[in-house]
Image (spheres, grey):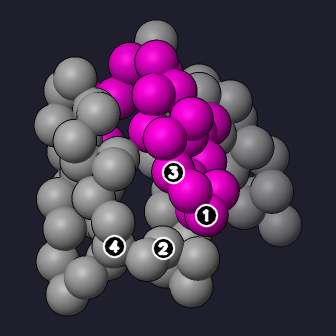
Amino acid sequence: MSYKVYVDQEKCIGCAQCYAVCPNKVFVIRDKKSIPINADKCVGCRACIVRCPTNAIRLTPRDIYATYTRFYSTG
C-alpha cells in the first residue's frame, strides 16, 4: 500500500529529521522546509512522524484518500 504524505509548512522548522530517517528518500529540504517530493515511494513506516519534533507530517493511505476525494468532489 502506498501513502499520501502531507507536511504542514507552518509547523515545519526545516530540521531535516524526516529526510534523515526516511528509508525511501521521500523528502527533500527546500527553502528550510520539508517537501515530500517522492511521496509515491512512501511505504507508511511512520519513521518520519515519530522523528518530527513539531508533528508536521501526516500520512493517509492512498486508497482511502482516493475514495474520499472521489466522494466529496462529485458535488
**Marks 2 and 1, Cα distance to the nearest angstrom?**
7 Å
Quarter of the image where one finds residue 11:
bottom right
Q: Mark 3 = which residue?
A: 52
Label 2 or label 3, whichever comes before in sequence order: 2
Q: Which residue is mark 1?
A: 54
Looking at the image, do the residues carrying marks 4 and 3 touch, with CB atoms under 8 Å apart?
A: no
Who's the residue at 19% across and 68% down the image?
Answer: 29
Q: Tell me residue 58's x, y (percent).
A: 61, 48
Find the magenta span and give its range: 39-60
Three-letter code for the amino acid on which mark 1 is drawn: Thr
Would you call the spot at circle 2 few (<14 residues within 10 Å), some (14-19), or many (20 or more)? some
Q: Is residue 21 above or below residue 20?
A: above
Q: Quadrant of the C terminus?
A: bottom right
Q: Which residue is mark 4?
A: 14
Which percent across, then down, holds residue 20? 22, 42
Q: Which circle's residue, 1 or 4, is located before the other in the chain?
A: 4
Helix, strand, or loop for circle 1?
Answer: loop
Are the two marked residues, 2 and 1, in contact with CB atoms closer than 8 angstroms? Answer: yes
Three-letter code, disc 2: Cys
